[in-house]
Amino acid sequence: MSLPHAILTALLEKPSSGLELTRRFDRSIGYFWSATHQQIYRELGRLEGEGLIRALPAEQPARGQKKSYEVLPAGRAELARWTAASQDPKPQRDVLLLRLRAAAVVGTEGIEADLRRHLALHQKQLAEYREIEERDFGAGKDSVQDRLQYLVLRAGIDLETFWIHWLTQALEEFGTLPAREGQPGSG
């Protein structure tokens, strides 16, 4: 149930329309919590119905004008309650790891190429995180908000670094496998 809390966080950072939220999810929040625009709009309606957010009054009423939302005191209280609550880590679920396990019994066709593709994607994501780090977290960024947001970015950098290291090792291991066609019992 974290999407409503991701939206409350984003709206506390800056009141926004659904479209603006969708763009912010694509640019920042989506690095660690993704949502489609349909999910965001549906959740905005639910949060508004529960009295946690409200649509800001329009400066000039106009048909088709986008609504901007802000968090109400009840929404801030809910986010504070959720933030303070203990939560257990979720077990790792990764399709690539499952496919690699399956390759041990059905063959490795296509796996090595996909490992290379994943490596390139993680290298690209790490480069993007490093750009954000350099652009947004230079000297003088010492507020509590800056420091906590940087911790989130560091988690992304460290995870991408882990995946790059692991994928590099996996590809090295693939280079030493007998029966390169990958069929069990072949050779």
Image (spheres, rainbow, N blue to C red):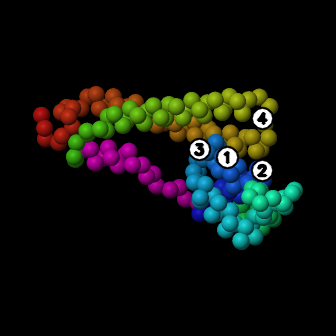
Residues at badges 1 and 4 in contact (C-beta under 8 Å)? no
Relative image position of residue 20 (x, y in whole percent)? 70, 49
How far apart, in angstroms, are the residues tagged by discs 1 and 2? 10 Å
Q: Which residues are magenta?
A: 85-104
Where disc 4 sits, the SS reads: loop
Where disc 2 sits, the SS reads: loop
How far apart, in angstroms, are the residues tagged by discs 4 and 2? 19 Å
What residue is pinned by disc 2?
Answer: 14
Nearer to me, 54 or 138: 54
How far apart, in angstroms, are the residues tagged by discs 1 and 4? 21 Å
Q: How crowded is the residue under tag 1: few (<14 C-alpha within 10 Å), some, or many (20+)? A: some
42 relative position to 144: left or right: left
What residue is pinned by disc 1?
Answer: 24
- Mark before the other along the chain sequence, 1 or 4: 1
Residue at the location (37% across, 36% down)?
Answer: 115
What residue is pinned by disc 4?
Answer: 141
How far apart, in angstroms, are the residues tagged by discs 3 and 1? 10 Å
Circle 3: residue type: Tyr
Q: In the rendered image, is residue 11 in sight?
A: no
What residue is pinned by disc 3?
Answer: 31
